[in-house]
Image (tube, grey):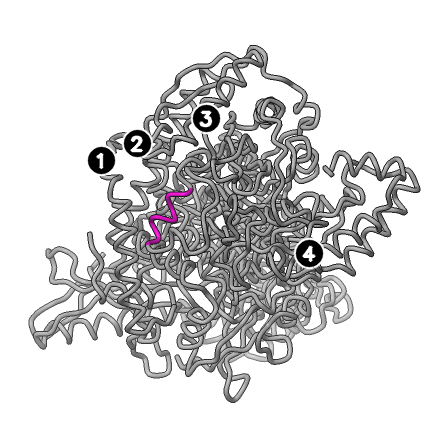
Amino acid sequence: MTIAEAGAALAAKKISAVELTAAHNAAIAVLNPRLNAYITATPELALTQAQAADARIAAGGAGALTGIPLAIKDLFCTAGSRTTAASNILRPFVPPYESTVTQQLLDAGAVFLGKANLDEFAMGSANITSAYGTVENPWKRNGSDAKLVPGGSSGGSAAAVAARLALGATGTDTGGSIRQPASFTGLAGIKPTYGRCSRYGIIAFSSSLDQAGPIARTVEDCAILLQAMAGFDAKDSTSAERAVPDFRAAVKGGVKGKKIGIPAEYRTDGMSPEILRLWEQGVAWLKAEGAEIREISLPHTKYGLPVYYIVAPAEASSNLARYDGVRFGARVDGEDLIDMYERTRAAGFGAEVKRRIMIGTYVLSAGYYDAYYLKAQKVRALILRDFQTAFADVDAILTPTAPSAAFGLGEKMGDPVTMYLNDVFTVPASLAGVPAMSVPAGLSAEGLPLGLQVIGKHFDEETVLSVSAALERAAGFSALPTIRAGVSA
Amino acid sequence: MSSYVLEGNTGTWEIVVGLEVHAQVVSQAKLFSGASAEYGGAPNAHVSFVDAGFPGMLPVINRECVAQAVRTGLGLQAQINLVSRFDRKNYFYADLPNGYQISQFAHPVVGTGIVEIELQDGTIKKIGITRLHLEQDAGKSMHDQHASKSVIDLNRAGVGLMEIVSEPDIRSPEEAGAYLRKIRQIVRYLGTCDGNMEEGSMRADVNVSVRKPGEAFRTRCEIKNVNSVRFVMHAVEAEAQRQIAVWESGGVVEQETRLYDPAKGETRSMRSKEDAHDYRYFPEPDLLPLVLEQEWVDSLKAALPELPDDKRRRFCEQYGITFYDAGVLTAEQTTADFYESVAKGRDAKLAANWISGDFFAALNRTGKTIETSPVSALALGQLLDLISDQTINGRIAKDVFEEMVETGASPSAIVEAKGLRQVTDTGAIDQAVTAVLAANQDKVAEYKSGKDKLFGFFVGQVMKAMAGKGNPALVNEAVKKQLG
Amino acid sequence: MSLDTATVRRIAKLARIRVDDAEVATLQTELNSILGYVEQLNEVNVDGVEPLTGGAQMAMRLREDVRTDGEIAEKILANAPDRVDHFFAVPKVVE
């Protein structure tokens, strides 16, 4: 079932929001102990919200999301519900305020099933850095029961939606954290333009990159969710003061006459043949739908990752300085104030978070700022310029989402840089602030989902959605994960 | 102007001083949050989640704080930068909730400017302003409220601060004091900071070094958070003496942060913040560039009040008073306003004398200010009117004024109630003169034999006989006439 | 550029993260691996390029000077690990 279908069924009173929510609560109770997609499930709160949704539907004031059960990435502050960022340092934290994005979803009548697992402070590409345990990808390789990662950092959100433990989910994307897990779990996910969704109340990782967006089963579902999540917010100085277009209408836009760019630099040396084939297939589908294909160049693509791994940790090292055990969160006592800080942060942060804080502290420190941080900002400007130049000629860009399908728990974990390479195709759009979407396009030889990425111009999510929808229609992706609600795994 | 030097064992030393003045912005709400910027309040009352650095909270800048910084920049005759940026200054401290202070490091909102200071000998010196930038204040840690803990109040955290940085143009404790007083005068005139150093809404970091005349600058030390003009002057001298002693004993002055101890009259090293010096400034990613419209700056400029230097010059020209008196009367905006309402349409010099003399003396004696003064500008003006229309004479006016200070009554009421009206009836005056001369026949004889000085004695006796109420000119005339 | 253990300790101190000797060695290896990876930026010619500081390319909005927040001391303190009345409390600082 999709959000669009559920919405229609609710409106037609074929099903109640309470029934829909209860079914999801039950599925979470069965499968979450295994998948660990939720850090905190809130079944009672969900039922209360569902009752209110039913009342609203009965009264005739329902919208497209009224009564729709969602998973909320545990990076969004939710008033009265514990919000951890998957970190020990926020284990006891109950925010007294609601993030703007979740408030807008609540206003639309959505039901929150619980807080979805993620990489600690959204730092990771496999959901293996959570202090609340790893998340298992509901998908399995053909004939194998090996545990695979769901991608990250929005791994819990993706796993929940894939395993039918939610109809949709919120995610956040800093360097690929919506798109890569969507690709790994056979889902659609969009990172909108930087500034499209308010960052107010979302626990910050890297302020100049973080953007909220939806993960759902279809492009249309993503459009429905984004419609409610997006919009200007005076509480976020980086929020864009512009009208939100009709995203759902854009899904039906088609690609006839649209110019689609294929960047040569994404064709990396080590690219797996099946990823390359999928990409070529995507090109063929769009061409068949009437799009015009153009070879383009994004010359600084390969520098995206090194820029990202300077800028994001630098901002994170500062953003995470507030976790000091003084005003909220966990504290470990010490001999004096500094000792208390050092023990609190040593115990509260996991290894990956510490690594990034350390790198970020180093690249900003006296004597190294120019060589690392300033240099990275300049290259970031060149990456933006690459996109601006390309978008003078094309309406959207098509690339693979990730260099591989979901990998096994324990793989790629020897060296942090190997893990970072997962983000190679998603990071450039984040650095440029342009919208980008992953849409499921096929299966790997091992039977795992693979996604294609559509990148658009600043604030042109509509084209991204219409191109993604065209790919979705052409791909006709209908495979289901091995582990999912209603199926004994 | 004689230059200020200190004598050491190895000859004379010159001191070099630059000031960083932190001035709290006058505004309703904080720089980046909607919490009250008011001083005081119950612990953590004027605090929002933004000020307390809660997860996911974001700063949104207050237009009025920017306007106040621009006004101050204009008052310092400084360059206004139409594009400026905010940076994060990273360090850990219990009263710094985010672990960073939002400040302006590389691109301040105000650039170079000039301030004129006046020294005791009347010379005017120009001190260069390097920059003015906006930043957040920190909260307050208190170490004496609890036996084993320090406690933190974030009411001040996030209040807007202007940091005004001077060039190292200051060469003596006197100049340092005059500069700080001048900055305080300017911000008070502009209404951009209340200049209250006791409450900490204005404080200074003082950079001091010493050198032999003609040398390049030597290493400086920064004395943090000095909170009065007097302490700034003392700290400059104490620190200069310390550095001279270090250099002269063959040592080397280390660049460091120090604190001034007013009780001991000396500076000491601040060891507690020793390792906190790598601030890792970088552009604040939660904010965008601050872009100002020239028209907006122009409109702020057009609405600026008259500045103290301009007012002082105008007072000299318009009211014909001395430069010195004009300086006294323009020291505070309220004084200047008071003076102008008294002087308007009256003898402006007389008004200046009364205000800088009897009026200030009365305020001092009663511990009152102009705002709480028992004598209003209106009442003082009425008193001067009674003098000029000869209702009372100048001597009686002083008694009436004291009565006004005492009771707050109007001068005419006092004059009527006490019958202090000046006697201008020449018959009555002649009568009094006749009586005085008759009672002092011997003195009259001396006078007539050439002792001219006795004239004043007769006038005084007549005034005394008339209880001070005689019109001095008429009394003079009558005495002269009767003495022949 | 390659980090030595003293630098790792200095950075940890700046970041206020307590590290033991074993962690220092691991961090040194990992951080050097990351720094080695980002070194490739040296290939890029950035002469005359203005650094890109943020995600949004627009001027900043300014809010009006109105008191809209605060006066919620109890909520501000509700998550505090330690407090004394309406103050946050930390180990005593000797200045």
The amino acid on which the numbered mark 2 sits, given as a three-letter code, is: Asp
Q: Nearer the viewer, residue C9 or C61?
A: C9
Most common secondary structure along the magenta stretch: helix
Give the mark, 3 or 2, whose residue is nearer the N terminus: 2
Q: Is residue A323 visible?
A: yes
Q: Nearer the viewer, residue B168 or A315?
A: A315
Whether marks 3 and 1 lie on the same chain? no
In percent of width and height, residue C43 lies at 22, 35
User: In this figure, which residue is indicated by the disc labeled 4?
Assistant: A114
Quadrant housing residue B376:
bottom right
Q: Which span is picked out in magenta?
A: A415-422
Q: Name the amino acid, label 1.
A: Glu
Tell me the CA gap for discs 1 and 4: 46 Å
Distance between the Cα atoms at labels 3 and 1? 29 Å
Measured in 3D between alpha carbons, the distance from the residue under mark 2 to the one under mark 1, in whole angstroms, is 19 Å
| Residue position for label 2 | A269
Q: Which amino acid does the dot numbered 4 rest on?
A: Gly
**Residue at the spot 24% in from the left edge and 31% down from the top edge:** C47
Dot 4, how many residues are within 10 Å of its Cα: few (below 14), some (14-19), or many (20+)? many
Q: Nearer the viewer, mark 2 or mark 4?
A: 2
Q: Secondary structure at mark 4?
A: strand
Q: Which mark is residue C43?
A: 1
